[in-house]
Amino acid sequence: MPKSGSKKRTWVKDLRAGSDLEECFAVRSVDVRQRRGGGPYLAATLGDRTGEVTALVWQNVDRLRGALEPGGVVAIKGQVQRYNQQLQVVIRQAEVLSAESVEDEIFVRSSAVDPALLWKQLICFIEEMSDPNLSQLLFRIFSDPEIEVLFRSAPAARSMHHGFRAGLLEHTVSVTTVARKMAEHYGLNRDLVVAGCLLHDFGKIWELEIGASIEYTDDGRLIGHIPMETLFVDKKIGELENFPSETRRQLLHILLAHHGEYDFGSPRRPKTPEALLVHMADNLDSKMAGMLEAIAAQGSDDEAWTPYSRILERHIYRRQIQSGDKENE
């Protein structure tokens, strides 16, 4: 079975239908399903830093199930096939690899933007604020060296959007950049919007952890990032003298309402213009990132449509009109 570094790696993005495959991958998920004619089979999602692929086990299901553990690393032998216009791997053999035998960087990619530049921009957002109470609060939070280490490396999600190293930082800076302009356009409290954007996903530094895959921590599963960040920010506010109660109330509301709807896990729906704006900017950035990643992820430039995106629940049209292009020329 393959071992990391023993040969040139076959990345997910390079898989081709009809080829044999012998490689190691991170196990993202595993489901035991039933065939139409009876009997179980396994449907797994395997991945590396370039993408993910569905993998199926039709034979020796009981024996191979133990090797396919979500969050673990597995060395497989199998064949790449195409089904319903999407690639999948049929696994014949599988062997568990220890986490120490492989490098995490193989399986979880990093932001394409230098985290140092992103962090510098985040600090600039705080420095440009005119509200002394909000800027003092933010400097108190983001000047903590332990917070900086966590925030500069944390992902923003397992897979929905910005699911990579420094994804949280990239997403936060992007949301803040967009929301600042929107706040000016609508004449809202820009500093309150900026504070809400910088803190809206702050709790994800404790909700998620990176190994061979991005997984939820125990606190992430039991508490979640919204309660964790709200409690943390309220504690930090309590450490400051004479922090305005109305500013506290509205900032905490932004954090509690940034998911927008109860169906999406939001404890509150946005009830202030600033809270609505932060929610919309967050939703826009996550959806746009997901769409752009789907366009870039697979397929040649000649293919008009992406494979079906489970995250966006649709196919994405890939052909783009370049600025200045004219049709029918």
Image (cartoon, rainbow, N blue to C red):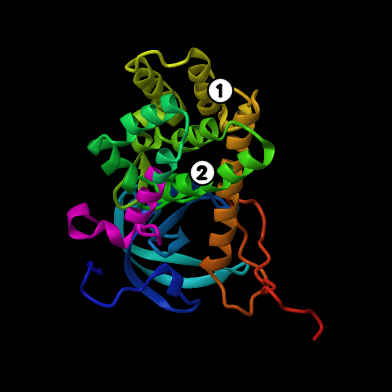
1 vs 2, front mark: 2
Residue 176's disc number: 2
Q: Foreground: 5 or 264?
A: 264
Range of residues picked out in magenta: 95-123
Residue at 38 percent across and 61 percent down: it is 49
- Give the spatial CA distance, label 1 vs label 2: 22 Å
> Residue 297, position in %: x, y?
52, 66
The foreground one among 194 and 158 is 194
Q: Secondary structure at mark 1?
A: loop
Please state, as top left, top right, bottom left or bottom right, where the C terminus lies in the image: bottom right
Q: Which residue is mark 1?
A: 267
How many C-alpha atoms fall within 10 Å of the one at disc 2: few (<14), some, or many (≥20)?
many
The answer to whether residue 103 is magenta is yes
Residue 70 in view of the camera:
no
Identity of the residue furthest to the right in this view: 328
Q: Can you give x and y, in whole percent of width and height, for residue 124 in the image?
A: 40, 45
Residue 147 within the segment the image draws in magenta: no
Name above or below for residue 320 compared with residue 213. Answer: below
Element type where label 2 sits in the image: helix
Which three-letter amino acid code belongs to the residue tagged 2? Answer: Thr
Q: Please tell me how crowded label 1 is: few (under 14), some (14-19), or many (20+) other residues with Cα within 10 Å.
A: some
Quarter of the image where the N terminus is located: bottom left
Pick the residue in front: 55 or 233: 233
